[in-house]
Image (cartoon, coloured by chain):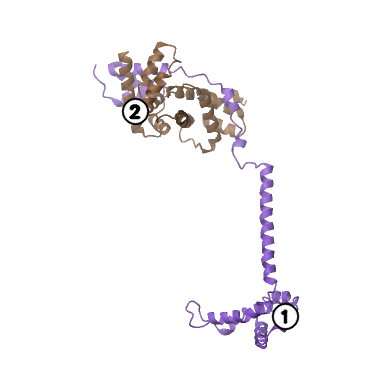
Chain colours: A brown, B purple
Amino acid sequence: MTPSPESRPEETDMELINRWKAGDSRAATRLVGRHSQALARFAASAGEREGIEELVQDTFVRAFASLDSFRGESSLRTWLFTIERRLMLDRRRAERRSRETVPVQEADQVSEYGALDGLIAEEAQERVRESLDALSPTQREVFTLRVQQGLSYKEIAEVVGSTEGAARVHYHNAIRTVKEFLKNE
Amino acid sequence: MNKCIDTEIQEMLPDLLHGSLDDSARRQVEAHVATCESCREILDVIRTVKSAAVFAPTIDVDRVVRQIPPYRMIVPGVEQPARTKLVTWLVAAGLVVALVGGGSLVISKQQTPAPSTVGRTQPESADVNVAAKPGNDSMPTPAPKTQLAPASPRGLALASDIEGLSDRNLAQLMDDMDQFDALPAAEPEPVIAVDSGDGL
């Protein structure tokens, strides 16, 4: 007996992509369902406070529009993180231009994220958020991709456009900072 | 508390929490953490940060999927819309008309005799002779007969009125015609056919 599509064992991302290309819209639903929350968490960890759902949506629209260029050399999630990160950078640049302020440096961004806090309800979460705010944007991206998403250094380097060695250094500096912050609280 | 210097183990701590280590590596890391206070502390930090990542909004999957266009709408070339095909054909037809029309104009201009054409026949022949002179370094020196042969049909074609020819031009024309007879029949025939309608 042939199993129905719903009862199939977990399909790989590439299998779902091929099904979607063949016209099966349910494959898109499964792909979005599989990766959307990870993208939302990454955006939130990277400092996005508003429009996260729109950001995730734009990420998927862009990704599906260029799926032919996805060769499967990295995981689909890593590729999605890369697209989402570019969108976040574009969004921040646009916000800076619209405010017509002095270009925001890394140190400014840290205080900016701290000022936007307000969504964290529990005390432990707030402490973690504050400890992440103490990191530079690149450290925060590397740290959250490693700790919260479980990406390898190679994948992280691909997402942030860096090297594995640099990603390692960012991670170790970040964990030292976060550890000290949480210890002193 | 002594700082742990086993960076290899430290780098695997997030993987331990994500369950992405194989059995051998997992047992190795767990055994190390059991005896290393520094790594236990780092593991606690990682666990805290990982479990605190719950503030992201819940994404409406259906809403996102509705914004994704179907594959065939995204990828061009699978099936072109009819309007695109029509525009392509119109452009192609326009190019053909322009080429045919332009070509016809050029041909008709070449066939229309100008009043000074006959007078120019001689100088053109002279130019050919000049070009064929040994003093011209850029040109090889062909035999005189083969040099004049291509000019003869042209002279005939441009002579609209034989009465307007001077004796010298008439003699030149006769010489040209003599040479023309020696040419292969296939090449000059169309020229003669065109000129015959002009009263020659």
Q: Is residue B47 visible?
A: no
Q: Is residue A136 above or below residue B188?
A: above
* Image quadrant where residue B3 sits: top left
For the residue pair B6 and B112, the one nearer the viewer reads as B112
Residue A151 in the image, given as x and y percentages of width and height:
41, 27
Of the 4 image quadrants, the one containing the C terminus of chain B is: bottom right
Q: How many marks?
A: 2
Disc 2 residue type (three-letter): His
Q: Residues within 10 Å of mark 2 (few under 14, many from 20)?
A: some
* Residue depicted at 37% across the width and 25% down the height: A108
Which residue is disc 2 drawn over?
A170
Q: Nearer the viewer, mark 2 or mark 1?
A: 1
Mark number displayed over residue B161: 1
- Label 2 and label 1: CA atoms lie apart by 95 Å
Residue A170 relative to residue B109: left or right: left
For the residue pair B30 and A86, the one nearer the viewer reads as A86
Q: Is residue B4 visible?
A: yes
Q: Residues within 10 Å of mark 1 (few under 14, many from 20)?
A: few
Which structural element holds mark 2?
Answer: helix
* Image quadrant where residue A139 sits: top left
Residue B90 relative to residue B136: left or right: right
Disc 1 residue type (three-letter): Asp
Residue B96 in the image, given as x and y percentages of width and height:
68, 57
Of the 4 image quadrants, the one containing the N terminus of chain B is: top left
Which structural element holds mark 1?
Answer: loop
Name the chain letter of the residue that bears numbered label 1.
B
